[in-house]
Image (tube, rainbow, N blue to C red):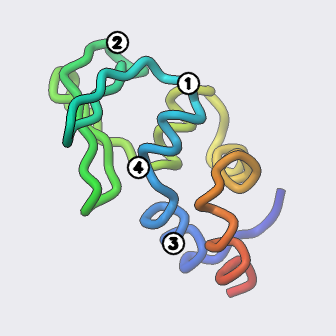
Amino acid sequence: MGFYSDNFLRTIRNQVDIGQVIDELRLETRRSKDLVRFRCPVCHGFHTATNAKTNLGRCFDCGKNYNPIDLVIAVTRCNFVESVDFLKQHIKSAAKVIDDGQND
């Protein structure tokens, strides 16, 4: 656990793929050609979607938006720093982000 720069946190939020986070958290999913729906950890509905351009997940039933950090917090009920640590340890796309920006 440690201090993370704003730049590093912004990079984690934007570049750690939300789809990989959903898979790592083992959320129930329904996939079609261009769409990934996941079970919302708040309301448990499936009226959800991910957006690759914004790297966000959204539940249209409860209105909650999830970035990678928020999604880990919602599913694991950990705190912010623990969520970032989880992403660093478990998500493959975080490796380059960590190498490039952790010490900013």
Q: Is residue 30 above or below residue 49?
A: above
Location of residue 24 in the rendering, given as x and y in whole percent from the top left corner:
59, 35
Judging by the rendered image, the residue that carries numbered circle 3 is 11
| Of the pair 85 and 53, the residue shown nearer to us | 53
Q: Residues within 10 Å of mark 4 (few under 14, many from 20)?
A: many
Mark 3 or 4, nearer chain start: 3
Cβ–Cβ under 8 Å for marks 2 and 3: no
Crowd tier of the residue under label 3, counting other residues whose Cα lies within 10 Å: few below 14, some 14–19, many 20 or above: some
**At 42% across and 65% down in the image, what residue appears?**
14
**Residue tagged by mark 1?**
26
Which residue is label 2 attached to? 44
Spatial separation of the CA atoms under disc 4 and disc 2? 17 Å
Image quadrant containing the C terminus = bottom right
Q: Residue at x 65, y 81 (%)?
A: 101
Q: Which residue has dot 4 on it? A: 67
Closer to the camera in the image, 54 or 76 = 54
Question: Residue 66 in the image: x percent, y percent?
Answer: 37, 42
Secondary element type, mark 3: helix
The local secondary structure at tag 1 comes to: loop
Disc 2 marks a residue whose amino acid type is His
Neighbourhood count class around disc 1 (C-alpha, 10 Å): few under 14, some 14–19, many 20 upward: few
Q: Secondary structure at mark 4?
A: loop
Q: CA distance from mark 1 to mark 2?
A: 14 Å
Looking at the image, is mark 3 or mark 1 nearer the viewer? Answer: 1
In this view, 4 is above or below 33: below
